Image (spheres, grey):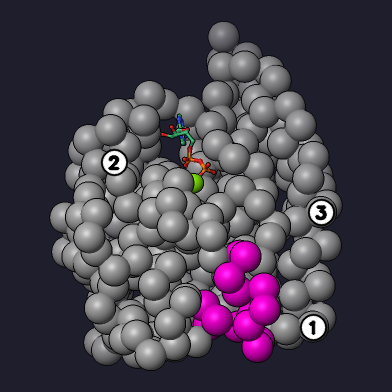
Amino acid sequence: MSGGTEQAAALPGLDAPAMGPTGRPLQEFPVPAPLTGHGPARIIAMCNQKGGVGKTTTTINLGAALAEYGRRVLAVDFDPQGALSAGLGIENHEATTIYDLLLSSKRDTREAIQHSSVEGLDVIPANIDLSAAEVHLVSEVAREQILARVLRQVSDDYDLILVDCQPSLGLLTVNALTAAHGVLVPLECEYFALRGVALLKETIDKVQDRLNPALRLDGILATMYDSRTLHSREVLQRVVEAFGPSVLETVIRRTVKFPDASVAGTPITQYAPEHSASDAYRQVARELIARGAVA
Ligand SMILES: Nc1ncnc2c1ncn2[C@@H]1O[C@H](COP(=O)(O)OP(=O)(O)O)[C@@H](O)[C@H]1O
Ligand SMILES: [Mg+2]
């Protein structure tokens, strides 16, 4: 028996570090020190022209997790479906929205900002009006820079501004990419997840080239991962092969707690603070801070 243990100890790989789902060694990201001052904000666009991949869920829960770590976060609903606004319990239909700010250069951005139930997490809501914005903005001067101008007014009040894009690569998304310092791409661990990413990359490159040279890809976040299915593991493996270190170590697993939290109109970090899914978004927050994408 003792011979067996010696043999086991000599087997290659036994002393190797534990592997995470991305096939790289598991990493610990430290709890960040509190900030001593706030702003100017770094702006991150949450982007993927495919719907239902976790853009809104990530905006809400990453925002809430960063607010827990003392960061001042502004979440901007940039989708006429208004899922971000609803997911954060913002239901005032008379409220000033992002659409009003885009359409009138005289408006004060602060007029549209509402507090969420999470301390340190504010929201600029959207509603179906926003679907008319592209048509109205097409004839504007510097039509790609309108959101940048809107957000500049409040940049000093926040550490991070997250823009929850709609599932399209139209003028609104180009506005988000032009205003942003970085892009975060949620990618669903499903067949065809990689379809369309080339087109997204092309759009990012074009915006970088023509409008916003400083724009960078902050990361790709694998979502709806199910470690029990071979299919999910294979998709994740292919994503890592395709994008290497751009893929965040943290992976978001599929759980019904997310839709449950959306219905309740609160981030999962409040709805089920002890759930592993809440910890996963806290880990995304720590990983982005460790990567320098967030202060
Ligand atoms: N990790 C997850 N596990 C299970 N369901 C999820 C997960 N992330 C998001 N969802 C659910 O999937 C749906 C689409 O997510 P959402 O964040 O709205 O995507 P997008 O903004 O990209 O369209 C929502 O009902 C949401 O609650
Ligand atoms: Mg969405």
Quadrant for the N terminus, please: top right
Q: What residue sits right under mark 2 in the picture?
A: 268
Range of magenta residues = 134-148
Element at badge 3? helix
Could you say where residue 177 lies in the image, as x and y percent from the top left? 63, 71
Q: Is residue 292 visible?
A: no
Q: Earlier in the sequence, mark 2 or mark 1?
A: 1
Confirm or reject: label 3 Cβ below 8 Å from ligand 1: no
Residue receiving disc 3: 199
CA gap between label 2 and label 1 equals 38 Å
Q: Is residue 145 above or below residue 120?
A: below
User: Residue at (78%, 60%) from the top-left corner?
Assistant: 201
Q: Amino acid at mark 3?
A: Leu
Amino acid type of the residue that numbered disc 1 sits on in the rendered structure: Arg
Res 200 quadrant in image: bottom right
Q: Is residue 167 left or right of residue 114?
A: right
Q: Position of residue 216 (x, y in %)?
A: 67, 73
